[in-house]
Each structure stands twice: as structure tokens, then as C-alpha cells.
Image: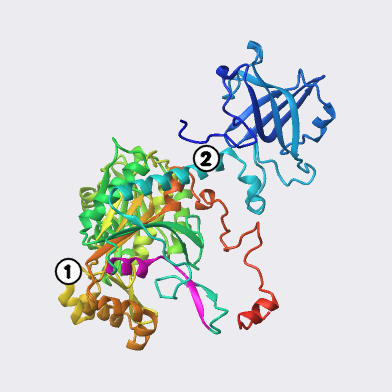
Amino acid sequence: MADTIGNFGLLRSHHCAELRAEHVGSKVTLCGWVNKYRDLGGLHFIDIRDKHGLTQLSFEEFKGDFSILKKCSLESVILARGVVRERPENARNNKMDTGAVELLVSELEVLSQCDIDAIPFLPMGPIDASEVLRLKYRYLDLRRPHLQKILQLRSTTALRAREILINEGFIEVETPILYKSTPEGARDYVVPSRVHPGHVYALPQSPQTLKQLLMIGGTDKYFQICRCFRDEDLRADRQPEFTQIDIEVSFPTQEYIKSLVEKMLIRLFDLEANFKMTMMSYDEVVKLYGSDKPDVRYGLKQMIVTDLFTDSEFGVFANPAKNNGMIKAMFIPASMGTLARKDLDGLTDIVKPHGGKGVAFFKVEKGELTGGVSKFISKEILRELESRSTEGKGDGIWLFNADTDHDVVHASADAVRRFLARKLELIKEGYAFLWVYDFPLLEWDKENNRFAARHHPFTSPKKDQYEKFLKGQKEDLMNMPAEAYDIVCNGYEIGGGSLRIYRNDVQDQMFKILGMTPEDTKRQFGFFIDALKFGTPPHGGLAFGFDRIIMLLAKTDSISDVIAFPKTTSATDLMSQAPSEPSDAQLKELHFKWDR
């Protein structure tokens, strides 16, 4: 008995990349789009296409009305029946998987004719259509084999993730899409309720409280490949709606979560023999790379060298050195490549978006210091710089970022490093994974003069920090580490999570530290606070950014390439023209006031 029903019950007997020499003499039926039509002086050929590939149709013995071929415009959908025959030796096409055979057509039916004069672009061959046009007619763009392969990749990867987690004892649980608005970092998308005038649902930014409630409910090991929604500014690796592989488990340690993550990455990225994951603390990774999600496939590590310039005569260095600021240095050995003066001057534009004012530099050529700030660099300072460098010493270029604001220095140094990697072609093929742990629990919001949760308000402090946390002294909270971790690949955060707060007193204190009143807390999280009172197991988890994983596997640099129907960076769907204005009837029904 066959394992699958195959093509039984379909109009076609085979797909368009299936026929081979062993099918010669068989009667088959193919269905697909007209990819190419050729009339060679009475000899007619059509290349029929589906998602799998192409087959050539020959009409050499066709007994029907040849006028039907005039309806076979490109991208029309046709059905062809006939017998498979071998192509002559001199007519074989080695560029086609089916190039050794062709279908000798006896019957042809045009199932759907394409209006070739109105089609905005042809999906096959070179695409000169703009991204806007391709998004507006996404269904045409999806006919491209490249995008069909990505959809197949998504499906296969999701299946693999499910298999791993189910084999590890996890169960898949669906959680609500219409839920309560809870502050988790980004703005919610809200949905007005018709039956509860003046009230709204929120689309979940993640199933955060829900998966924790599942642990309180005794589910033990949960996962879900779920849709999440965040009303935030978009970029190449963000969409307003996205997919997570959401995981939560009771009684875990960080080591358990890390081991599970490693097992999943090995399987999802097919890295059985070559898997390696570097581990670094948050403080260490930011010190070396200026970012908590660096691409570690290349060097250009940074050094904090503030102490070397406390007596500098160069104001750009002296000011931060004497005012608790920071100076970072980065060395580019000559073996990596060189930068023209235009490139060095252009680094100012690289750091400006991050608050940086410029990038200082000097060169070492045959042991001599030249250019830039070289007159402020003594041989003693150079020797100290070289002794700290991880990139070696000798000829090359030294770059410096300096400011009184540490965050500006780190962000600027990171931006310069990423620019240099592209400019000097330092990025290697393959995948480099990084486990970043001990993130800060909180960050200080200068604008509102209060603490904000670095991750979300359910992230646990380190257990040995509970006593200090419950006392709530600002100086203790400023750099308190959390049981939080991220998984980074090739400069992208592809997953993040934490061990959660499971004690009621710790969760109450977290809300207080974040400046929430008891009334705010009860209104927004009353249901969750109540649940913590009735016996909560220690629990934690992680959410993978599924779209980013597929983006990396597909070797593209935008998640819109790996989503069937993506939105633009302004969160619009060009194909359906969403979002759209509600009708007057809808507004009335929802008791919704609208200022048109």
C-alpha cells in the first residue's frame, strides 16, 4: 500500500519536473503555467511550469485545433495529455531536469487564460519590477521558484522544530489571539469589542503571561509556533506580525534551556558535525563588540582604553577620560586591508545616527605613526595599545570612538565594526552562534526618571540577588544581573528568554520598582498576580524568532523575503491595501468615534 495518495484524484498524473527516461511510453497528464511558447515554422513547443520545474510539450502529432495555441499566452494555466517520449540527442536540454524527454501532446485544454497585456510583470526570468510592484502583486511574485523554495523551507523547518520538541516531551498548546493589553515593551495592536462598548482586546506581543499560566496549570513542557503582533518601527528584520517558536518548561536551569537550544539549532541548521556555540556574558560581549548581538564570524574586537588618555592633550580624548566617559580602540592590521582617506572621513557619517561625533584614527606604516591624531600618540601608548590588541600589532590603522556617554561609544564602535566587515569583505560563509547570558535586569529611563524592565517584568533576578532586589536600593539595582539569555547568529538575535519570577513577593517588588501603583498592577495583571498565590513551579523558557531563522537559512537579508504575504516598513499590505478605513456601519456597531 502506498504511503501517500500521491496525485490520485488530481487533474494531473505527474508534476512538471518529474518525467525522466523511465517514463518514456507512459500516458501522463500535466497541469501548469505556460512558461514559454515557440513556433518554429510549424513545429510548436510549450514549456509548462509548476512549482517543481519545467517540462517541454511537443505538438508534432497534435490532432486538435491549433488555434487553441493562440490562447496559450504566457502565464496561462493549461492541461496537457499525451505520451512521454525521448528527445533526440541533439535536442536535449541539460539545463532542465526533464531535458531528456518531452510530452507528445494529444489533448490540450486552457484552464485559465492570462491577460498578457495587463500583467504587471512576468515572474520568470530577470525581474526588473520594483519591490513595491512585487508586493502589490505578491501572488505573481510567489510563482518564482526562489520564493516557493523558501515557503517549502519554512514548512520543513517548522516540522523539524515540532518533532524535536515533541520528542523531548513538550506538548503544543494554542493560546488566544484576542487577549488583554499588557505592557511588554512595544505598543499593542488593539481590537475594539462590539459586545463590550468602550473596551478593547489586544493582539499578543507574545504569549508571555499565558505560557507562564500554563506552567502554573501544571502543563510542565509547552511549545507553540505562534503569531505575535507588535506596533513598532520596522526594519529589515522586523514585521508588525511575526512568528515565534515559543517554549516554556517547569523546573529548568539555564543549562537545560541552553542544551535544548543547541539540540534544536543543530537540527534546524543541519550542523551535526560542525556545530559550535560561543558563550559570553552581556558585559563581556558589549565590551568586545559594542553590541549584544555581534556577528562573531570575523574579528575587529574592541578595547576600552580610557585609562591611557587621562593626561592627553587631545580634547576629544581628554574630556571623556576625565569625566567618567569611555574611549574604545579598534585595530585593523594591514593584512585585513586598507582604507582610503575618503573612507576614514566617511566614518563620521557611520556613527552620527548613533550619537557619535566622529572617529579618530592614526596609521602605523613601517613602525612610524602618521595621519589623524598621531601627534597625540606616544610610542609608549602605542606599545600599550598593541599589548591589549587581539588583532596583533604592526602596520595598520587604529580607530577610536570617544564620548562621555558609554552607550554612544558602544553603539558607534559597533556600527564602525559592521561597516568595516562589509568594506573589507571579512564576513565568512557559515553560521556562528553566540549564547549571551547575564543581561541586566533593569535599565534606567532618564526621560521618565525611573527603571524599566530590560526584557519584560516577569524576568527573574539572579537568585543570589533576591535579598538586594527586595530591598530595592537604586545603587544595587543599576547593574543587577538577570536570569536572561539570548541566542545570536551572524549578528541577529534569533532567540531570547529567561527564567521567570515565580515568587509573589519578588513579582510585587518588580512592579513597584517599575513605578506601577497597586491599582495599575491589579488592573493590568490582577489575574496573573492571583495565580502566583496558588503554588507556582520555577519555570522559564525561550522564544525563537522563526522568521529570522528562515531568513538565515534562505541566505537573504530581509524577513519580508521569507513571509508569504509581508507588509512594508510602514506596516501596510500593498496587495490588499490594508490597513483600511472602517465603514460608518462598523464604527457605529463598535461604538467607535472616528475623526476622519
Marks 1 & 2, CB-CB < 8 Å contact: no
Question: Is 216 left, or right, of 119 in this rendering?
Answer: left
As drawn, the label of residue 463 is 1
The image quarter containing residue 59 is top right
The image quarter containing residue 117 is top right
Identify the amino acid type marked 2: Lys
Please tell me which residue is depicted at 57% across the width and 54% down the height of the picture. 565
Q: Position of residue 438 (x, y in %)?
A: 24, 62
When the figure is inspected, residue 217 is found, relative to residue 49, above or below; the finding is below
Q: Position of residue 18 (x, y in %)?
A: 57, 27
Please tell me which residue is depicted at 25% across the width and 43% down the height of the picture. 392
| Residue nearest the viewer, comparing 347 with 277 | 277
Q: Say which element carries label 1.
A: helix
Which of the marked residues, 1 or 2, is nearer the chain's N terminus? 2
Question: Is 240 left, or right, of 325 in this rendering?
Answer: right
Question: Is 574 left, or right, of 242 in this rendering?
Answer: right
The image quarter containing residue 408 is bottom left
Number of other residues with Cα within 10 Å of mark 1, as a class: few under 14, some 14 to 19, many 20 or more: few
Question: Is 245 left, or right, of 529 in this rendering?
Answer: right
| CA distance for labels 1 and 2 | 46 Å
Q: Position of residue 74 (x, y in %)?
A: 74, 36
Q: Say which element carries label 2.
A: helix
Number of other residues with Cα within 10 Å of mark 2, as a class: few under 14, some 14 to 19, many 20 or more: some
Q: How many marks?
A: 2
Q: Which residues are magenta?
A: 199-216
Asked whether residue 544 is in view, the answer is: yes
Please tell me which residue is depicted at 35% across the width and 79% down the height of the picture. 527
Q: Which residue is mark 2?
A: 149
In reply to whether residue 116 is colored magenta, the answer given is no
Identify the amino acid type marked 1: Lys
